Image (cartoon, rainbow, N blue to C red):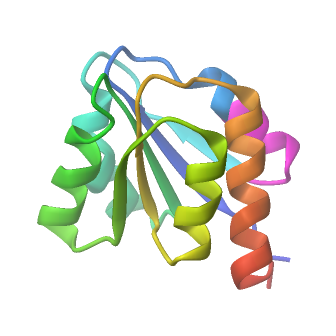
């Protein structure tokens, strides 16, 4: 069974609660440390071969758009709910931009949505 790797970049250096949800669903989380971590999301996703990238900032876009521009990831940004993230995964997006939503429920739901779409092999 392939472990789903989720990279989390938060403008305020958070993301630990989302990481707990990722791990609860059987994934592995990398929380990028420090303020403005969202802007490093694409670089860390690329280096670590991440399956899902999550960017958190006020607008829900800066880190996700930067990852898209630099590496070509399929992105959805400006999201504010778990359901929007699940839909984005179902539609093939791998980098997701949210407003500040460091919630365990989000990490768990995104890993489950990824497994539902791609399987766990």
For residue 25: magenta? yes
- Could you tell whether 29 is left or right of 34 in the image? right
Q: Which residues are magenta?
A: 19-27
Q: Quadrant of the N terminus?
A: bottom right
Where residue 85 appears, as percent x and y from the top left, is 57, 52
| Dominant secondary structure (helix, strand or loop) of the stretch shown in magenta | helix
Where residue 62 appears, as percent x and y from the top left, is 20, 39
> Up-down: is 117 above or below 63?
below
> Up-down: is 51 above or below 116?
above
Would you identify the image quadrant in which residue 61 lies?
top left
Where residue 83 appears, as percent x and y from the top left, is 65, 49
Q: Quadrant of the C terminus?
A: bottom right
For residue 33: magenta? no
Q: How many marks?
A: 0
Q: What residue sits 58% from the left and 23% below the top?
A: 102
Q: What residue sits 79% from the left and 82% below the top?
A: 119
> Up-down: is 61 above or below 87?
above
Where residue 2 appears, as percent x and y from the top left, is 77, 75
Would you identify the image quadrant in which residue 118 lies?
bottom right
Q: What residue sits 30% from the left and 35% below the top?
A: 38
Q: What residue sits 24% from the left and 23% below the top?
A: 36
Q: Is residue 104 visible?
A: yes
> Up-down: is 83 above or below 90?
above
Q: Residue furthest left?
A: 69
- Could you tell whether 88 is left or right of 75 in the image? right
């Amino acid at each position: 069974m392939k472990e789903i790797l989720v990279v989390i970049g938060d403008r305020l250096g958070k993301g630990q609660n989302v990481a707990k949800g990722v791990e609860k669903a059987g994934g592995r989380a990398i929380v990028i440390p420090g303020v403005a971590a969202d802007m490093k999301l694409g670089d860390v996703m690329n280096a670590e071969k991440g399956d899902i990238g999550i960017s958190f900032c006020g607008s829900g876009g800066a880190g996700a758009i930067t990852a898209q521009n630099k590496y070509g990831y399929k992105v959805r940004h400006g999201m504010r709910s778990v359901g929007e993230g699940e839909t984005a995964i179902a539609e093939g997006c791998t980098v997701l931009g949210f407003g500040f939503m460091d919630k365990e429920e989000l990490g768990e739901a995104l890993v489950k949505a990824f497994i539902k779409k791609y399987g766990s092999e």
